[in-house]
Image: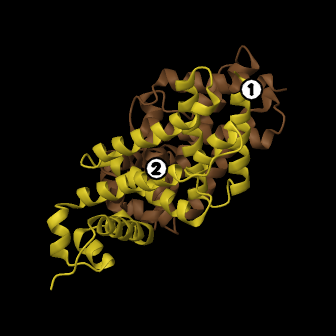
Chain colours: A brown, B yellow
Amino acid sequence: MPRLIDPEARRREIAEATWRLVHREGLDAVSVRNVAREAGLSTGSLRHVFGSQAELVGFAMSALGERLAQRVAALAPAATPLDAVADVLEQLLPLDAERRREAEVWLAFVARARVDPELQPHLELTDGALRAVVHESLAPLDPPDAELAAEELYALVDGLTLHAVLLPGRPSRETMRKIVRGHLERLAARR
Amino acid sequence: MPRLIDPEARRREIAEATWRLVHREGLDAVSVRNVAREAGLSTGSLRHVFGSQAELVGFAMSALGERLAQRVAALAPAATPLDAVADVLEQLLPLDAERRREAEVWLAFVARARVDPELQPHLELTDGALRAVVHESLAPLDPPDAELAAEELYALVDGLTLHAVLLPGRPSRETMRKIVRGHLERLAARR
């Protein structure tokens, strides 16, 4: 009797197996065969859904964005507008083991996507999703020149993430939080 | 009769051949053999100097930092303290073809260095050199809490660089300049 499969749960398993592989062995290790083994699935069943390595990597990249969106949607109401913005931005920073692993996988993806034309559309999707999260996060502060403010904040958050992933502890979690809070306080004061 | 060789010019040629290879084909293409071919040297003569791929890549990474330091040292005196800081920071941003290529090579390096223990010491050296350039650049503005201000600016510049390398034009050169200038103006106003 065939096992009943929740397609959403299956997709999540595949994404998570891909992230684990990228994190442990790098992007070169991602293949339909390796991901199937990591997820405990047959290669055939996975190949049925993903025709190529690029499709699989692209899917795992979009799934990172979805997970971020879910965390943002699940945030408790914040005490102040500034807290509300900071809470969203902290979901993007490598402040715990889960977000740190996400950031490491993200760095591997983007570095490859720059030189792999097949991954370029996935890079644009991910970039668009992250950009939108940062832009929308700023709404409670309603800063002047919101577009430029969002572009600066997006660069700041990704720069901090990049540095913390490359050399753990530089900047520390405390420093990342302090920098983002200070930046937002000055942004709020500009109105 | 053996050709007389300027060791500094030879080192520069090797670094530039390595950058061209990384830029054109990615870091996987870097080997003592391929770099020798790209630089028009014999594999034996190159192997005499660089025992491994990691040594070669580490050398090319340090050479990027040296080139940046030379550009900064060669800057003309600036009209205002703020201009002086902006002039230095603009040497780090991908604002022309040369700095753009450097940034692309830098991204390939750092993404690999995160997962390659042999490259990790080179990553720390490069990070230390860039961090020092940003920190020292701020001296003319003498901001309060200089350490934290430098950490924020360093993240901002690298975030902008990362985004511009990944998706050319987002942010545009004009936007990058505007963001850095605005950031420095507000930093100067904090004193």
Q: Residue furthest top?
A: A79
Percent position of residue B41, x then y: 25, 78
Left or right of residue B149, residue B13 in this image: left
Left or right of residue B40, residue B2 in this image: left
User: Which quadrant would residue B128 be assigned to in this image?
Assistant: top left
Percent position of residue A9, x then y: 49, 43
The alpha-carbon separation of the residues under discs 2 and 1 comes to: 28 Å
Percent position of residue B92, x then y: 55, 50
Which residue is painted at 59% across and 26% down in the image? A179
Amino acid beneath label 1: Ala
Which residue is painted at 71% across and 42% down in the image? B181
Numbered label attached to residue B69: 2
Q: Quadrant of the C terminus of chain B?
A: top right
Q: Chain of mark 2?
A: B
Which residue is painted at 73% across and 51% down in the image? B175
Which residue, given by chain and number where applicable, does mark 1 sit on? Answer: B189
Left or right of residue B106, residue A68 in this image: right
Give the mark, 2 or 1, whose residue is nearer the N terminus.
2
Give above or below for B56 relative to B4: above
